[in-house]
Amino acid sequence: MQQIQFVSPETLGGSDAVVVDVREAAAYHDVGHVPDAVSIPPDVYRDPTGFAPGMLPDPDAITDALGAAGIDRSTPVIAYGADPANAARFLVTLAVLGHDADLGLVGHDVESLARAVDLTTESVDSDPATYESTDYDSPLLADRSAVEAASEGEAILLDTRTATEYDQGHIPGAIHCDVERLLSEGSVRPPDERAAVFEAVGLDPDTDIVLYCNTARRLSLVLVALLDAGYGDAIFYEGSLRDWLQAAAPTWDPTEIERIVREHASEGTRAVHDALGEHSASKLKLVGIYDQKQGGEHHMFRTKLPGGLVTADQARTLGAIAEEYAVPPASHDAGPFDGGYLDLTTRQGIQYHWIEMGDIPAIWDRLSAVGVSTYQSGGNSVRNVVANPAAGLAPDEVIDTRPVAEAVTEYFEADTRYANLPRKLKVSVAGSRQVSARPGINDLGFTPAKKDGRLGFNVHAGGGLSDSPRFADPLDVFVEPERVVDIVAATADLFVAQGSYLDTAVNRLRFLVEQWGVDTFRDELDRHYDGSLESAGTDLREGVRRDHVGVHEQGDGRSMVGLAVPVGRIGGSDLAAIADLAAEYGSGDLRITHNQNLLVADVPGDRVDALRASEPLEAYSPDPGPVTRGMVTCTGREYCTYALVETKARAWRWARELDATLDVCFDRVRVALSGCIASCAQPQLADVGLRGETRRDETDPVPHPAVDLAVGGDPANQEFARWLCGRIPIEDGPEAIARVIEAADREGDSIEAFVRETPAAELASIADPTTVAEPTAD
């Protein structure tokens, strides 16, 4: 086997090697590539099938691609990619094929490479060659017995996944070295810094090392760096790790976690983590406590409110907690948000920031007194059950979903069997003909149906967003309301038995549905279900309800009044004031909507005008501008460590500016700003979706905030927004939004219809006439 050497970009022009670009084909052709470089995209050198796509591909498939690119076994090869790990994965694949010639890795991402080499979009013609195919048989490949031996201490077992993944579950005996520690701003660190990393994690050049991750992409870069540093006895494992990680996954008891937090909270955050022991951060999420970007004693704190239902008493308490405990320090720039505030979420819950660990026991006591829980509001558990915000109110309601959501919540709350699933499990229950609970993007979605005169639900599974969005598939299953909880339990049991505890990037339920297909998934669900699954009933859905802002008639003749909460952030005193209005003018019931707004229930028709005229509704209006009405945001970089851009204050300003300047016929424009590809703001469902990115220009190597832009999300037709423009400077965001909206208005179409009928290239030029980069791939 040839050793893989790190090479500098400057060597590319004068080398006899074939230079291989291992990025997606679209990036190679549209963004540009190194002159004379050939393209071998990831779906060639990483198996695109299976639960965790990316393992070693079929040898015949990759050797055919190598031959087509003009490469045979004696051809020197240099590879580069969007990041060094992908290029390393390609070269390691060649190494285990037994490649005979030199292999070189460009240890820079493509942005860094572009500063040293002028990229081109010119096509490259290669003279075909013959790459002799062979089975994988290399001393680099570890078998299962080697992993077992390393787990028992006969070698060093090295986990190269992220710290979060390692904390959530790893093979017993493994030590941790996140591949990101070898990188600095997208480039591999110098040899002395890499050596320092290896020494710091406890590696010994004289001890055998067995590496693993999920699909061997990340470990490939660590492996190349180890071999380059003289760790000659390093090998890697590609087989399944599911059984190891399931066996290692601990059983957690939320009530015991709460007890430990209460006992040690007064001693501070560090004391709580120490008392909880291993996986402490994940345990805290299970009871609603998350690390906050600012660190120290400050935390994000989340409640669980099934279906978004909130009584006036609960809302007053939730508001008072914000006023007393969720107050940013004077040194923090809170933008337009004064005092203690809270955020309404797209899962119909509430979350706070700046909560100190020492205050959490008192907060729990106050929440418990009004019947609010934080159990399983986070973590790898059955999360807050979402439902129609107008459940029990809507005139088109088929089934009141309130008791269903409550039953599912009660069944799973504090149950130790379901407190540490492979990944979070999200459930939506929709009971109206105009569906608003977004069942299509949940792990499990229940939609109204009728069979043999019985009302119930058809079941859908495998929906989700993030960077691999898909709509849930219909399972051909009908269930009556009282048995919904049994379907959810059977799904959770299936997930425990078959889900992956290995890599949080590919272990949501949707990956299992996609791998198996609907028929196999349904059969497996039937095996775990107590009874026999019925085939689907008649679908009673008639469309999708976009939001609940404004005044709407209820089924009983009274009105529900939807209030726009700009970007979902509301002061604690304001929430308490709205709770008082709900009690004065309605029944006292409030609902949190999926668009981060509030709904006041049961207002008699003759009292609507008086409610409209009340002072709190000047800021939280039932008649807002179209962008304020439709704006949804995630937490953003202000508090989230994953986000690349600040969202809340920025979107608040954008909405005000756009509403003041736009002159269009639309009463609602759905804009979603998400800080990263995790898509917590659901940009794929928006008229205009944006997600945070960074960009560099030729004169300034410092990254600046930017956004990718998508248009045309249409849940009614199961169409995700199309990503059109990449890395638009974030200050140009409002203009890009305005151009799309105004173009649709000129055509006289709905935004969905305009996007559907306009070619993507034309849409991209409308949104950003200067677009030069492709958005990151979904």
Image (spheres, helix red, strand yellow):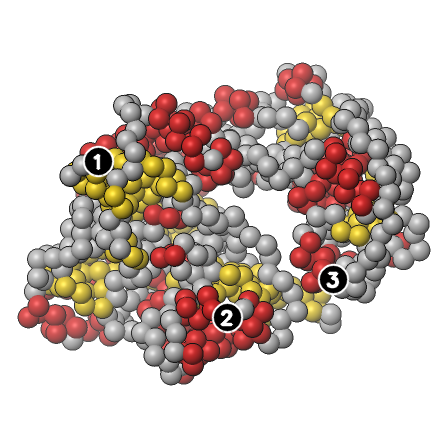
The answer to whether residue 712 is above or below residue 531 is: below
The first of marks 3 and 1 along the sequence is 3
Q: Considering only order in the chain, which callout, 2 or 1, is on the residue closer to the N terminus?
A: 1
Amino acid under disc 3: Gly
Q: Decide which of 153, 392 is in the foreground and name it.
A: 392
Q: Earlier in the sequence, mark 3 or mark 2?
A: 3
Dividing the picture into quarters, in which one does residue 573 lie?
bottom left
Can you give x and y, in whole percent of width and height, for residue 228 in the image? 83, 37
Q: Residue at x 15, y 51 (%)?
A: 392
Residue 274 appears in the picture as rendered: no
The local crowd at label 2, few if under 14, some if 14 to 19, many if 20 or more residues have their Cα within 10 Å, is few
Q: What residue does disc 2 label?
A: 758
Residue at image location 61% in from the left, 23% down from the top: 173
- Gap in Å between the C-alphas at discs 3 and 1? 55 Å
Identity of the residue drawn at 79% across and 64% down: 122
Q: Is residue 523 above or below residue 712?
A: above
Question: Mark 1 touching mark 2, by CB under 8 A?
Answer: no
Residue 102 location, x and y as percent? 89, 40
Q: Disc 1 designates what residue? A: 480
Q: Position of residue 391 (x, y in %)?
A: 19, 51
State which mark lies toward you, 3 or 2: 2
* Residue depicted at x 76% and y 23%: 208
**Place of residue 192 in the rendered image (x, y in percent of width and height, measured from the top left):** 81, 43
User: What secondary structure is marked by label 1?
Assistant: loop
In the image shown, does 76 or 421 lie closer to the viewer?
76
Q: Which mark is residue 32?
A: 3
